[in-house]
Image (spheres, rainbow, N blue to C red):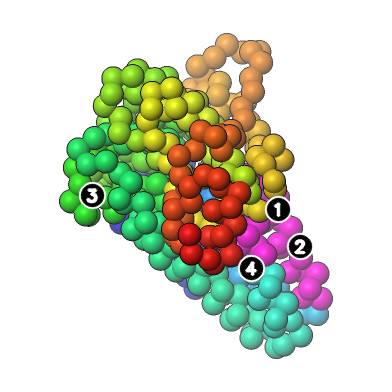
Amino acid sequence: MVETIRWTDEGVVLIDQRRLPLETVYVTCRDYREVAEAIRSMAIRGAPAIGVAAAMGIALGMQQARPPELDVQFEAICETLARTRPTAVNLFWAIDRMKRVYAGVRGRPVEEIRAALVAEALRIKEEDIAVNQAIGRNGCGLIPDGKAVLTHCNAGALATAGYGTALGVIRAAVSAGKKIHVFADETRPFLQGARLTAWELLAEGIPTTLIADSMAGYFMKSGRIGCVIVGADRIAANGDVANKVGTYTLAVLAREHGVPFYVAAPLSTLDLSLPSGEAIPIEQRPAEEVTHCFGVRVAPEGVRVENPAFDVTPHRYVTAIITERGVAWPPFEESLRKLAGGGAL
Ligand code: MRU
């Protein structure tokens, strides 16, 4: 399976997801500003993956920070990374984890501070893989055998430290011997489905059919789709789910056609400080992503464009939320809080 991001002596190495699947290119970010730029420009993307990248970016920044005034430099590094993308809460969750570690070692010799931050960033990466495998185990039973599964965007190994959330559940179901066929939405405008999900699944020999986003209704009506499974960028306390724009459309279609709609996400994607999805900040991306395809203009000059990168699916359309601690069912207010608190369902 592809390795999304790695800590090395030279810097943070990541696979440039903007160039897949045409080219497999690894880039080395040699200072924290380059890591921030990689997140902003979506060389690395996907909620858990950008959390890992931010943590490694902070660790990298502090390798180069010089005493005195380490506190000021640490804050500036965290600020820069926090300003990259607003919607996925995993980014802020990872920065908070790094801040807690820093608070525990500040005032200690700089070498000790650096080592502690690197260790925490590596822990965040390793934990993410284990968490995704647990999500896979917990969700595997929900995937119907012998039917197609529809997914949107890329919630796979590339969107995480490895294995994936929604694609992790699909991987686990395939490993358990289920006959699964994946329908992957191409996911305009950034084409994460066409470029990344299709690439990842084909590499593992998982049967995959690529469809344009606008075909989802056609296939749901055909009765071939057994369930929809997607990842998430932020989940509010009531179970409202922010994910790649177009997810809401799928959820409404799924309800109309009696198809279960599952969300697979780590608990680090929960934002219990938000009572509902209303307050989730939605990133607005550049118009060129819509007017152009691979640098080629496909829309007339001067046309007005809007490009929200995410939408919010109201919890009433969500059948269940699969996490590493178990599956949350409605009412999500209760089940999510129990899972987040470590309680059994
Ligand atoms: O804009 P992106 O590519 O970062 O958006 C990614 C998604 O919306 C994913 O579905 C989400 O982050 C979950 S990834 C496990």
Q: Distance between the residues labelled 4 and 3?
A: 34 Å
Q: How far apart are marks 3 and 2 (CA)?
A: 45 Å
- Magenta range is 69-97
Q: Quadrant of residue 147?
A: top left
Q: Name the residue under label 3.
A: 174
Disc ID at residue 43: none
> Of the residues shown, which amino acid type is indicated by label 3?
Val
Disc with the residue nearer the chain's start (4 vs 3): 4
User: Looking at the rendered structure, which numbered label has been put on residue 273?
Assistant: 1
The first of marks 3 and 2 along the sequence is: 2
From the viewer's perspective, is 138 left or right of 333?
left
Foreground: disc 3 or disc 2: 3
Q: Which residue lies furthest to the bottom in this view?
A: 109
Question: Mark on residue 76?
Answer: 2
At numbered mark 3, what does the secondary structure look like: helix, strand or loop?
helix
Where is residue 19 drawn, in percent x and y?
42, 41
Residue 38 in view in this figure: no
Q: Earlier in the sequence, mark 3 or mark 1?
A: 3
* Secondary structure of the residue carrying numbered label 2: helix
Above-or-below relation of 164 to 283: below
Secondary structure beneath label 1? loop
Relative horizontal placement of residue 112, taking residue 199 as reference (left or right): right
Q: What residue type is labelled 2?
A: Ala
Q: Dot 2: within a 10 Å radius of its alpha carbon, few (fewer than 14), some, or many (20 or more) residues?
A: some
